[in-house]
Image: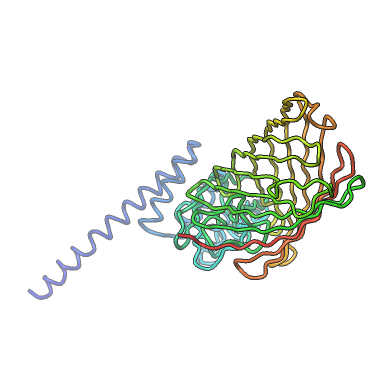
Amino acid sequence: MRIWAVLIAAFLLASPARAQKIEAAQAFDRGKALMAEGKTADACAAFETSMRLEPLNGTLYNLGLCHEKLGKLASAWSELKEVSQADSNAARAKDAGDRARALEPRVTRMRLVGPVPAGVVVKRDNVDVTAYADQPTPIDPGTYTFEISGPNRATQSMKVEVRGEGKTVDVSIATLVAGVSEYPYALPLRPLVMPNGKLQLDAQTSIVASDNMAPDPIFAQLGGRMGIGPVELEARAQFNLRYEEVAFKPNPLATAEIMARYAFTPMFYAGLEYAWVRPFGMYGLHGFELRALGARKWLVHPRVALVGGGGLRYSERQGSSGKLTALSLLAQGRAQLMIFPWLSAEALTNFGVHIANSSLYDGATELTVGANVVVVVRRDIDVYAQAYAELLPTAVHRTFLLGMAYRRDVY
């Protein structure tokens, strides 16, 4: 009786395994038939089913051949390489190895362009790939969804299309990491708008050197920016410390600005700006400007970012001769370089074309070029120096500026 009980138990335990082997064999045969019919995608699915039910080197070899034919070269390379190392069938192992070596230079690779701060997790189609930052990793061509999450921040996501045999495709996750991690040291990695809940306060002093002004005017500026959800609000005020006309004593307030920007991503925004302007000079005009601007930032290298943007500006001034207005097209470009994590440099240019009522300005165009150096004293404090030169309409104004920025989390 004991022997019969053991035999019955063994039969009952073996039945599911036997059925699984049969299903695996049927799926394998179905895959072979579909391959012969040219239905490659269906054949690969059948081989994958067979592998899940019963992983065998012969099935893995055929799955690798199927993926190669389907264009999934990274999967094919990995599968054939595994067969070459583990298969006891010497002829099949050799063929798999030869095929894997031939495929390797054709494989597409993906490189996550970091860095990834501690505590931040990067997922690609729900698979954790954080450890792959800055490492070329084989990947099948296709469109992937990357998600970046970190402590006390909303998850950011983006879709990236990876294509090209033998190419390494850089996936810039820094634009998303900037929105979910601590505020980056390096200027190229910083978002264009302040992250949600973060406040930045600025204090600046500038002098405008000119060939036709004596003494050169000196200004002080105070400002603040804060991220509230996807929106950044900013306010700035500029004050006269020394005016160009000794006999002219204007109100200390020179300009006041308010700005609102909506961040479609941390590196892409559109916004509106309003500036109230007091006279610049004894016979200057007072009025306001309304600007609609947008900007986009691209991380082209872990240390280099490019910023491009532009928009429209409506200007209105009031003087002794009445009201003058102008409509201008604006464009801006910036190149940012991380020299060290705590030291960044920036080259910038601003260009404007007055497309209506340009008599408000001296010429039909305006062009300014400049440079900026940012030193991170500590995580929440920057000091920076900027220099600008006006090239159009006349190369007479040069601005030199020193400033400091302080950041903190409000919530």
- Residue in front for this viewpoint, 97 or 67: 67
- Residue in front for this viewpoint, 149 or 350: 350
Can residue 7 be seen in this snapshot?
Answer: yes
68 relative to 188 in the view: left or right: left
- Residue in front for this viewpoint, 239 or 165: 239
Q: Residue at x 68, y 30 (%)?
A: 314
In the orientation shown, which residue stands out farthest toward the bottom? 2
230 relative to 95 in the view: left or right: left
Asked which quadrant contains residue 178, the reply is: bottom right
Q: Is residue 58 above or below residue 213?
A: below
Q: Position of residue 188 (x, y in %)?
A: 68, 56
In the orientation shown, which residue stands out farthest toward the front? 247
233 relative to 34 in the view: left or right: right
Can residue 387 be seen in this snapshot?
Answer: no
Asked which quadrant contains residue 289, the reply is: top right
Q: Residue at x 51, y 64 (%)?
A: 87
Q: Is residue 286 above or below residue 244?
A: above
Q: Is residue 193 above or below residue 331?
A: below
Asked which quadrant contains residue 91, the reply is: bottom right
> Quarter holding the N terminus?
bottom left
In the orientation shown, which residue stands out farthest toward the right? 211
